Image (tube, helix red, strand yellow):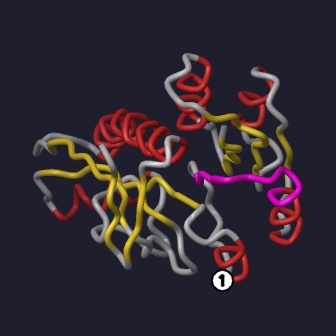
Amino acid sequence: MKNIAVLISGGGSNLQSIIDAIESREIKGKISVVISNKENAYGLERARKHNIKAVFLNDEREIINELKKNEVDLIVLAGFLKILSSEFTNSFENKIINIHPSLIPSFCGKGFYGLKVHQAAIDYGVKVSGATVHFVDENADTGAIIAQDTVEVYPEDSAEDLQKKVLEIEHKILKKVVKDFCDDKIRKKDRVVFIDK
């Protein structure tokens, strides 16, 4: 059984979708620790309600030590609003995944988070948007893509409308990637990710 750490900065709705999938035995893994760089993040409360260790840490070294102490196999960035250093990403190479609320390489990178991503997509006039789960490297949103899914964007959609639609597929694809990782189905060759059936 894989040990999972989830890093959050906010409400933790993606965290909740993983907790639910573990409790329903859809995912064969265990969340060992939830870490937030924001002391009052509601996601910490979500974790505690399910008897999951939840800690506030803002120092990267302390976060690395906590992850090593918990012997984590997979680190999930679920709305974690902090760019990780190369020391961090190299310490856990191919073990860190992130969910981003757009179809990378569109509307991603430094400064693209939360509602800003959806507003940029609306302003550009895209007809489809979506979510991407990718491996994390030392740059923002540049790691190999593992999974993507799409939603239609209508001319009358607001950024908030689009955010709601994308969040639904975020929960779906993040859960699936965590499940596949725990089942040892994900292989990576250079930038190409294979998912075994």
Amino acid found under the numbered disc labelled 1: Ser
Quadrant of the image occupied by residue 41: top right
Residue displayed at 26% across by 43% down: 158
Q: Position of residue 31 (x, y in %)?
A: 71, 37
Q: Position of residue 140 (x, y in %)?
A: 50, 74
On screen, residue 76 versus residue 133, left or right, reads right
In front: 174, or 56?
174
On screen, residue 167 versus residue 52, left or right, reads left
Residue displayed at 28% across by 59% down: 103
Quadrant of the image occupied by residue 157: top left
Give the answer, above or below, for where 73 lies relative to 145. Answer: above
Residue displayed at 38% across by 79% down: 190
Task: Please state the total of marks drawn on the protein image.
Answer: 1
In front: 81, or 61?
61
Q: Position of residue 52 (x, y in %)?
A: 80, 31
| Local SS, label 1 | helix
Residue displayed at 43% across by 45% down: 177
Q: Is residue 147 magenta?
A: no
Q: Position of residue 4 (x, y in %)?
A: 68, 45
Look at mark 1 in the image and give the residue it sits on: 86
On screen, residue 128 versus residue 30, left or right, reads left
In front: 13, or 18?
18
Of the 4 image quadrants, the one containing the C terminus is: top left
Give the answer, above or below, for where 82 lies relative to 89. Answer: above
Part of the protein shown in magenta = 67-77
Q: Residues within 10 Å of mark 1 (few under 14, many from 20)?
A: few
Give the answer, above or below, for where 91 lies relative to 17. Answer: below
